[in-house]
Image: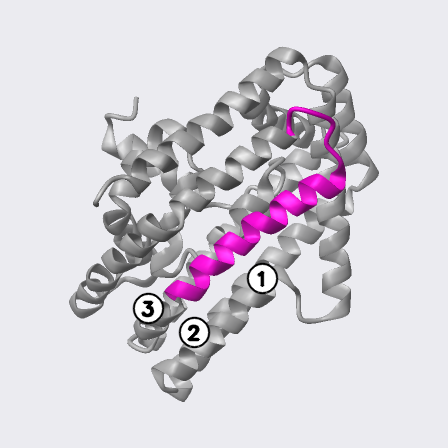
């Protein structure tokens, strides 16, 4: 299947879209929100194991493809992306991947026993820390590119982001019809990609959890759109004010920081409530997993660890 480059590119692009109902949604969130930048395609690390090596080893091409689809890059900007993405990838490969292996191995050991919501939240927090490290490192490269953007390129990105948001809301409305049965079904299907076939008990756990917090999906869509608008606004500010690259980098790093810690108390409280509800559901699914499901989950995580280890050992 993955020998088909067109299929692979479509799959990887789909992995970068929002998936707020996944039991590991926080793993993806930060990478998705920076997808307008050169760092975006590094998040292919959370695509399927079969596609990960192919995507990672072609991240320069995929990053250029993704950026061009949003911004309509000119030839000088394409050159800038090509020139800057490879050192970023080399840094990531040489300094981050082995840490990912150790982190996954630690999680696998934890999953051998009972798991609490606090465990899941800590796991997601540590994932976010690693994504923030990536954002911090990439910020100067993103700032350099942002300073070259024309107003019409930012308008194009804003239009595409708005289209993505409309599609996500339409999907949410469709899922909520029939008392949210479609939403439960989708969540179950995504969970099965990690556990294997769910039991009836686990499906009921999902149904009860989602029914008890109906506002969560709406909140996440609202929050995602707000963050995207803030990113577009930041690009417009950089384009209009023409700050130094150092100042633009500082602005971008501040933006990345608030992806993990919202700037106002109300947003922080809502984010905490959302994350806790998701973590409680994830913990319940793990604790009600059959021995076979635990084997499947452990194998999935180990496959990622082995791929990261292999990629870390490659020179490029």
What is the C-alpha distance between the residues marked 1 and 2?
A: 16 Å
Whether residue 125 appears in magenta in the rendering, the answer is yes
Judge the density around disc 2: few (<14), some (14-19), many (≥20) Cα neighbours within 10 Å: many
Q: Which residue is mark 1?
A: 259
Q: Residue at x 40, y 68 (%)?
A: 139
Q: Which residue is mark 2?
A: 235
Q: Which residue is mark 3?
A: 141
Q: Residue at x 35, y 27 (%)?
A: 50
Q: Position of residue 142 (x, y in %)?
A: 36, 68
Q: Quadrant of residue 140?
A: bottom left
What is the C-alpha distance between the residues marked 1 and 3?
A: 19 Å
Q: Residue at x 33, y 78 (%)?
A: 147
Mark 1 or mark 3, which has the lower sequence index?
3
Judge the density around disc 3: few (<14), some (14-19), many (≥20) Cα neighbours within 10 Å: many
Q: Quadrant of residue 264?
A: bottom right
Q: Quadrant of residue 277?
A: top right
- Main SS of the magenta segment? helix
Q: Position of residue 107 (x, y in %)?
A: 59, 35
């Amino acid at each position: 299947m993955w020998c088909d480059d067109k299929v692979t590119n479509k799959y990887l692009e789909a992995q970068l879209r929002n998936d707020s109902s996944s039991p590991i949604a926080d793993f993806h969130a930060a990478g998705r929100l920076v997808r307008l930048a050169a760092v975006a395609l590094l998040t292919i690390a959370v695509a399927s194991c079969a596609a990960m090596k192919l995507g990672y080893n072609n991240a320069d091409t995929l990053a250029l493809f993704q950026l061009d689809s949003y911004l309509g890059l000119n030839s000088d900007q394409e050159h800038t992306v090509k020139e800057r993405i490879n050192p970023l990838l080399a840094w990531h490969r040489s300094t981050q991947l082995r840490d990912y292996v150790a982190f996954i191995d630690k999680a696998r050991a934890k999953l051998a026993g009972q798991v609490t919501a606090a465990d899941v939240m800590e796991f997601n927090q540590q994932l976010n820390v690693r994504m923030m490290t990536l954002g911090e490192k990439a910020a100067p490269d993103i700032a350099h590119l942002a300073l070259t953007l024309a107003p019409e390129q930012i308008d194009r990105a804003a239009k595409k982001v708005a289209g993505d948001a409309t599609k996500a809301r339409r999907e949410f409305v469709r899922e909520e019809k029939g008392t949210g049965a479609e939403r439960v079904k989708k969540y179950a299907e995504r969970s099965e990609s990690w556990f294997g076939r769910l039991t009836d008990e686990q499906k009921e756990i999902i149904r009860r959890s989602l029914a008890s917090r109906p506002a969560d999906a709406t909140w996440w869509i609202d929050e995602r759109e707000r963050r995207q608008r803030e990113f577009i606004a930041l690009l417009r500010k950089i384009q209009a004010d023409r700050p130094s690259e150092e100042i633009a980098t500082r602005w971008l790093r501040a933006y990345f920081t608030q992806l993990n810690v919202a700037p106002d108390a109300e947003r922080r409280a809502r984010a905490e409530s959302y994350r806790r509800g998701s973590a409680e559901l994830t913990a319940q699914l793990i604790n009600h997993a059959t021995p076979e499901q635990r084997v499947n989950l452990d194998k999935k995580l180990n496959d990622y660890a082995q791929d990261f280890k292999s990629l870390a050992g490659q020179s490029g």
